[in-house]
Image (tube, grey):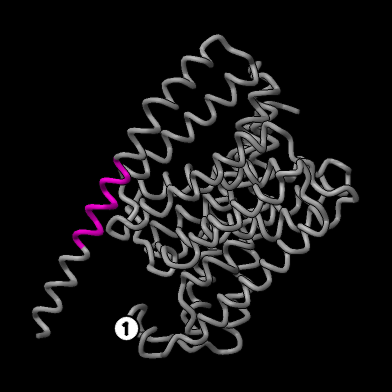
Amino acid sequence: MNLILVLGLLILGLVLLVVGAEVLVRGASRLASSLGISPLVIGLTIVAYGTSSPEMAVAIQSSLAGQADLALGNVIGSNIFNVLVILGLSALAIPLMVAQQLIRLDVPIMIGVSFLTLLFGLDHRIHRSDGIILFIGGIVYTVFLIYQGSKESDSDYDNEYGEKEPLSGYQWFKNIALMLLGLGLLVLGSQWLIDSAVIIARRIGVSELIIGLTIVAAGTSMPELATSIVAAFRGERDIAVGNVVGSNIFNILAVLGISAIVSPNGVAVSDAVLHFDLPVMIAIAVACLPIFFTGNVIARWEGLLFLSYYAAYATYLILHSTNHDSLQIFSTVMLFFVIPITVLTLTILTLHSLRKRHRQKQITRQQSD
């Protein structure tokens, strides 16, 4: 394919991602306002599930082709990318406010289903019965979110998000059409971006290994990336954060669940995934709690921390896959220096935040007395 044509396809793919994200966020926020459902719930469900459609497509295709283990790798890789890169870049652009519901409910659920994946994979296979449990869990979670959103009183909604905006039949159709159009543009844009990037990488001599570890792994998360960044800039920060958390939960419960169901032999879990990639995914999910909890905001420095850890993760994968001489030194520095310092810092910040909240409660009680 002509290089100019490939570059044009790459640019067009990026444009479609931005336009699709803008259209999707606009339609979703208006629909949330008219239904009286919080943008967070819309972000956790409709937006998150829609932007995860590339992962679903890859998972079903690979499972039917007898390569269900690729579906597991795609889910784990996407979940790691979603938190570290998407939230990292979004927070660098604009510090993200985190709703209490995420800290109390959704992030613990994300941690729980991540541990459940590890538990199911201990026998080196996620069976069809495990997939059914995961998929049913996805249905229950979705129904619960919608039920909780519909229970929110009009006064509570108006106080937090402003008055509802009643829509006519035409406006309803228009906003739903905007969301579907946005999702379609996101999927098409991400596919064109991946295809053109792979061709360019091959032309300049980048190895197939590096292409697989970077471009293809991140490609299916491009819709989430574009949507969260656009949502953050538009001030729809609940959608920006909810999209990531909801996508991660959907990837495990629905994408991995369906993969295990449709695959004749379930999903194979290798030793490398069991001993490294799954624990990394769980650790990142757990790390969200203290970062989200401190001030209910993801600050710019925390976004930079997320991005730094993704760079470290990608570096480890490349060094490990190529058996590079620097692997041992890199692993030692990460394990005994970088990670302990990060854990210590987050622990101190969490304790400081807890003390601050405790003092605020005491002051409030004294004032009420």
Residue furthest to the top in view is 325
Main SS of residues in magenta:
helix
Quarter occupied by residue 158: bottom left
- Give the magenta range: 345-356
Residue 337 in sight: yes
Name which residue lies at 58% across and 55% down.
248
User: Relative to residue 116, is residue 225 drawn left or right?
Assistant: left
Q: Nearer the viewer, residue 42 or 16?
A: 42
Q: Is residue 87 left or right of residue 50?
A: left
Where's residue 275, x and y in %?
63, 34
Q: Residue at x 59, y 52 (%)?
A: 114
According to the picture, the residue beneath numbered tag 1 turns out to be 159
Residue 185 visible at all: no
Residue 159 is situated, as x and y percent measured from the top left of the image, at: 32, 83
Q: Is residue 332 magenta?
A: no
Q: Quadrant of residue 196?
A: top right
336 and 81: which one is in front?
A: 336
